[in-house]
Image: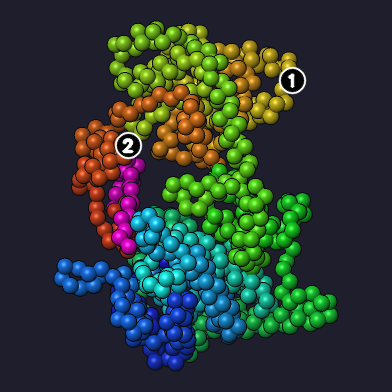
Amino acid sequence: MVASIGAVASASQGLSYYEHDGYYAPDDPEHRRASAWAGTGAAALGLEGEVDGETFRAVLEGRVPDGSGRRLGRMGKDGAVAHRPGRDLTLSAPKSVSLAALVGGDARIVDAHDRAVRVSLGWVERNAAETRMKDPGTGRMVRALGQRMVAATFRHDTSRSLDPQLHTHAVIANMLQGEDGRWRTMANERLYASKMLLGALYRAELARGLERLGYRIEKTHADGRFEVGGVSREVVEAFSTRRAAIEAAMAGREAGAPADDQRLAEWAALLTRAYKRDVDKATLREAWTRQAEALGLDAQGLVAEARERAAGRREMDRDTGAPVGAEPDGGQEGTEPALDTPADRAVAWGVAHLSEREAVFSRNHLLAAALAWRPGAVTIAEAEAALGRLEAAGTLHAANLPGRGESLTTERARIDERETIALMQAGQGRGAAPMRGRAVDKALRNGPLTPGQREAVKLVLAAKDRVVGVQGYAGTGKTAMLNRARALIERRGFEVRGLAPSASAARTLNQESGIESETLQRFLARNAGIAEGRLSPKAEKAMRQAFSKTVLVVDEGSLASTVQARDLLRIATALRLPRVVLVGDAKQLDAVDAGKPFAQLQAAGMRTAQMRDILRQQDPALKAAVEASLGGDIERAFEKLGDNVAAVKPDNLPGAAAARWLALSPEQRERAGLIAVVSQIV
């Protein structure tokens, strides 16, 4: 894990990072030199250079060290001040980088790591260090950036398993200074939302520095993780005993691999965490060297080659006049648009990568993707500038959705959404109704269906619009409704074909409703020529005749992407289908690929039947909880859940959730659901 964020539970815990790191002798003089103050807030307080314990403790306790006696926090009934100390942002170098620095003895790498940490913290201060304050105009509490941050960094060089691991704990104090000079506490939401970007930012800056030092960077993962060329995977794994312990813990509980579930991996990390123990540093490095030699790694030779490569590059630069550490060209010809700079190409790659799956994505995720394009090729400032150029050109648009933070969408996505909505609206009043409304009412009068199911059947059979929707919450009996609708439709000489987003969903639709079904993807692929307008007039006439009495039912329609919905409605319009029925739950499921057309079509006026009667939950309390949650009454929902809710400490949420899940039998897990809700007072 390159970047992690954790809470500092107490001032004494934070101070332990200063007093000794626990991995080697506490009196080692190198440890003091490995600490430093960071942030313009620290500078404003005159805190520079090495961190001293007394001042650090005061900062974590919320005492502003400016001689004013000011203390942040809330006064309790007992007169004690409650103050949250801060957050520990840990940035860790790739294993091969740690080996080159600590076994190969290249102190330049430590400097490159320190610089990458400083750049990352600078970004945090500008973009994530926010507070809550009263707006003088409205009197309301608002969030405000532009704060001065106080942080203390502590560089360590071993893991808890005593493997070489170059990493820095950046303890960000819960203490910010505003432009008005006042000190306030920090809100953490932006910091946590930036975790992935901070990992990408640190990696990019570190890779950039390593390339200048002569090291070759080999990208290993799509998110920009990398290793130094010349260090084999076997060596990396051999020096990663901590990760091996985590993998073993998860495998022993049949929980998969760490990459499969990050939260379970965090739980396993807590479970396998070893106690820190003091070890003589020189002895430890001798052991690392012997282990490296036994594995065939010449760490000193790796460093020497990098130095020679860097020296040769500098000599070439003097001869050619090219800048030292010139940016690589990046990308293969013909695969990316010809843009002006590597940053433009990186951001364009990020847009293409993210828009495959999401019509709306966050600004931070796009920047992280751009930095992952080629580790070290672009800086965060260059990526932000390139993103700004796309916004200015109208290629990207703001799409600030509730709860999504600063989000973006592409012009292509907006065009697809508008076309999908226009196709639905163009079919209003142009469908063919297999039955009249009164006939449907008569047929359903004495049946077992709920009012919501009867409303849905009536809409499917009697509506005059080509495209209609059925909004059915989980457990409301959608397939039972479809089974009854199919029977009535077939009596009128129409046929019903089912589409679903997966083969298993198509089988379920077939088995439970009697509708012959296939995957939505297969149907769209088979009729791609129609969606793309490549059908000849003769073929179009023949297909219209063949589909003149066909009703298409798309189950789990909320999983269809915008492009899939657009193509489906293009086909329905071209063939003049009498009815397309989209069945799903816009609140429960999101589209697998980019976009949420099911919800968008409802908002744009698609006639939609509502199925709200819960049939699945037999337990009265659980049923009441579900109904309350659907109505937005979360407090009542939790009351009804009763003993099914367990309160745990926020810092132990992943471990507590994983422990309860793993305690269930495989059969119980098939029928169980787990929801984690974090309530945080900051």
Q: Position of residue 370 (x, y in %)?
A: 61, 58
- Can residue 22 be seen in this snapshot? no
Q: Position of residue 369 (x, y in %)?
A: 59, 57
Compared with 169, 131 (above or below) is: above
Residue occupying the far left of the picture: 78
What is the three-letter code of the residue carrying label 2? Leu
Compared with 548, 643 (above or below) is: below
Badge 2 is on which residue? 630
Q: Is residue 627 magenta?
A: no
Quarter residue 180 falls in: bottom left
Which range of residues does the magenta coloring cover?
A: 662-682
Front residue of 158 and 442: 442
- Can residue 587 be seen in this snapshot? yes
Q: Residue at x 36, y 33 (%)?
A: 474
Q: Residue at x 57, y 81 (%)?
A: 111
Badge 1 is on which residue? 536
Compared with 668, 112 (above or below) is: below
What is the three-letter code of the residue carrying label 1? Ser
